[in-house]
Amino acid sequence: RVLVLDFGSQFAQLIARRVREQHVYCEIVRHSITAERVRELAPLGLIFSGGPASVYAEGAPQCDPELFELGIPILGICYGMQLACHVLGGKVESFPSREYGRAEWHIDKADPLFEDVAPVSQAWMSHGDQVANIADDFEQLASTSDCKFAAVKHRTRPLYGLQFHPEVTHTIEGSKLLGNFLRNICGTTGTWQLGDFATETIAQIRQSVGSDRVICGLSGGVDSSVVAALLAEAIGPQLSCILVDNGLLRLDEEKAVIEEFSKHFQTDLHVVKAEEQFLAALAGVTDPQEKRRRIGHTFIDCFAGEAKRISGAKYLAQGTLYPDVIESGASRDGPADTIKLHHNVGGLPEELGFELVEPLRDLFKDEVRRLGLQLGLPEEIVWRHPFPGPGLAVRCLGEVTQERLNTLRAADAIVVGEIKAAGLYRATSQAFAVLLPVQSVGVMGDSRTYDDALAVRCVNTDDFMTADWSHLPYDLLSRISTRVINEVKGVNRVVYDISSKPPATIEWE
Ligand code: XMP
């Protein structure tokens, strides 16, 4: 295995994922891990992530200096490189020309790290500080026009540093560089499979849960289904699932979930009908965060009420994924900045008094999907686009009423249905309708209308942390628009959202 030391980077998990893509098992650990513990774990390599700090800043994350003495290959990325160079006698400086975004880098010296790597290519830079001087024990390997030490290596130890980020897709030769480090420098064989993750996780669940009962909230989405499948496999008869029908689901979704669920799992399923309760809680509310808060509370009430009826439950399983964790700033040591608080990562567990089981906490969505297929879940579940916990409430801008929800549901079914019919559902990451609290003038037949506008949102993304709007064919957009306006009462205008994330988010609220 390989260990990624997290220095507070948004990218630590991305590094881990790239390593796993090379079929090398990888875990993320705190930057403060001791050399003694590393020796026990006996990894084949260490990767130091980037981080937002400057090595000279007070409280800047450090590492045990003895790590450099272990003889285990180390790759320092960005902050990780600066730290290694600084600790071993080099000098780091804040440069006036901070580099952000794409840069061209050149290989200056051949090295096993650069096997089959193009001599000049594009890299992704994101740094204020950089290494200004290296100690005599180091040599310079590559550069950009603004950065002399874009890649360095130690002359006698298996220690490398990269100022740019090989883990992001904008660094064209990034995965080759990581692959070369893993194979040529660490000597990994690349035989690890995601299936090993399932086996290990199932064993871990069995061990930590023992003979206690586990409750699992089921939404019908990929994440909770994969969690349920893992648990069903691990502790089958000790599992009880709860589906809260909040009235904020898509057209016929609840029915489909129950059908799929009973086909694939032989566990205890409790359906809580709570539509009225949710609508009452949302009456008159237009502020997005307030909607989330009220939905969160109502969900807890419904869920807790049902959970009380299940005797002997000690654990609560949740489908929290890594992007939820990092976007809430809950990354292990907490140095990552908070971006946005998702309600499913907030208060739920503590208030319920359960211990948490979060087996997908380290995974990205595409890894969860592959895991789902391995566990035998059907493609309809595995490839379903993600759907937010607060459901249609955050896609029904303005006040949420039964009538507006019905309008939105009908329009959403047309949007998704047409995208499926065009064979583009799998090619897009998330597609949905948003009902706007905006009326505009239209003309239908001979009469003037003054109805709602509907936005169509469709994005492509690998990890939901950044996304681009999908370049859907015009004739498809045109079919969607015509059908929505003709078939959905109360909508007379359809607009297509062409904003990327960032700066926009995927959802409108
Ligand atoms: P944003 O809108 O933040 O969405 O770009 C990123 C991904 O997260 C989903 N999302 C949520 N999921 N509770 C959830 O469970 C939420 O409150 C929530 N808000 C957004 C969103 O659908 C997208 O897949």
Image (tube, rainbow, N blue to C red):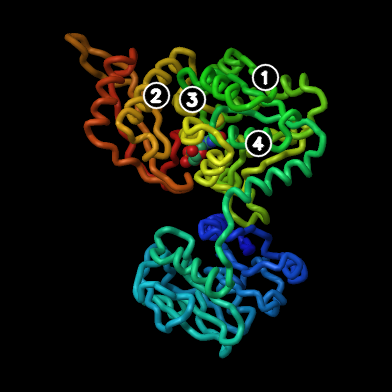
- Residue 68 position, x and y percent, is 67, 77
Left or right: 499 as drawn, with respect to 195:
left
Please name which of the two marks, 4 or 1, marks the residue nearer to the observer: 1
Q: Earlier in the sequence, mark 1 or mark 2?
A: 1
Marks 1 and 2, how far apart in space?
A: 27 Å
Q: Is the residue under label 2 in contact with that under label 3 (CB below 8 Å)?
A: yes
Question: Residue 114, located in which quarter of the rendered image?
Answer: bottom left
- Badge 4 amino acid: Gln
Q: Which circle, 1 or 3, is nearer the viewer?
A: 1
Q: Which residue is mark 2?
A: 412
Note whether 169 is above or below 69 in the view shown: above
- Please tell me whether mark 2 sits on a helix, a strand or a loop: helix
Residue, x 64% and y 58% (percent of image)? 28
Circle 1: is it few (<14), some (14-19), or many (20+) Cα within 10 Å?
some
How far across and down, in percent of the image, does residue 354 sit? 77, 34
**What is the spatial separation of the Cα atoms under label 4 and label 1, in whole angstroms?**
16 Å
Q: For disc 2, does the CB lie below 8 Å from ligand 1?
A: no
Pointer 4 residue: 318
Q: CA distance from mark 3 to mark 4?
A: 21 Å
Residue at mark 1:
270
Instruction: Report whether residue 178 is seen.
Output: yes
Q: Secondary structure at mark 3?
A: helix
Q: Earlier in the sequence, mark 4 or mark 2?
A: 4
| Residue 497 percent location from the top left of the image | 33, 36
Q: Which residue is mark 3?
A: 392
State how far apart marks 4 and 2 are (Cα): 27 Å
Badge 1 amino acid: His
Residue 322 position (above or below residue 506): below
